[in-house]
Image (cartoon, rainbow, N blue to C red):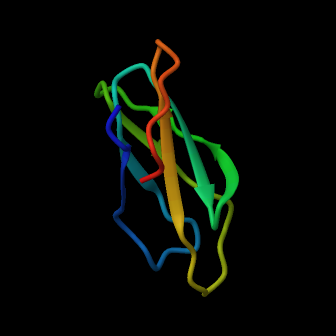
Amino acid sequence: MRPARLRCASPRAATPTLTVAAEAGSTVRVYRDGVFAGLATETSKAGIFTFTPEAVTDASYTFTATATDKANNTSPAS
């Protein structure tokens, strides 16, 4: 399984929205600095997921995501 692709459209926002591309129907887990932050929600476009973390302060964070498909295969972290 390929890694989920993670993108942030507004990296300086206090509550940035992250967009993740993964296999449609997957469960996408998002991590902030290696700690589970929550599940991304699949949008109306299959395979595109979004996640808005809790408000963040002006600092540097590393967000990663994994995707688990219906066959229970989990991708490497993006």
- Residue at left offset 47%, top offset 24%: 73
- Residue at left offset 34%, top offset 27%: 23
User: Where residue 68 sits in the image (x, y, percent)?
Assistant: 50, 28
Identify which residue, 46 or 23, lies in the foreground.
23
User: Where residue 5 sits in the image (x, y, percent)?
Assistant: 33, 49
Q: Quadrant of residue 3?
A: top left
Q: Is residue 71 left or right of residue 4?
A: right
User: Where residue 63 sits in the image (x, y, percent)?
Assistant: 53, 63
Identify which residue, 53 or 76, lies in the foreground.
76
Q: Is residue 59 above or below residue 75?
A: below
- Residue at left offset 68%, top offset 52%: 37
Identify which residue, 3 or 38, lies in the foreground.
3
**Residue lying furthest bottom:** 58
Quarter of the N terminus within the rendering: top left
Q: Is residue 9 above or below residue 27?
A: below
**Residue lying furthest left:** 45
Q: Is residue 50 above or below residue 54?
A: above
Q: Is residue 6 above or below residue 23?
A: below
**Residue lying furthest top:** 71
Q: Is residue 30 left or right of residue 1?
A: right
Disc count in the image?
A: 0
Q: Quadrant of residue 11?
A: bottom left
Identify which residue, 74 or 35, lies in the foreground.
74
User: Where residue 42 sits in the image (x, y, percent)?
Assistant: 44, 30
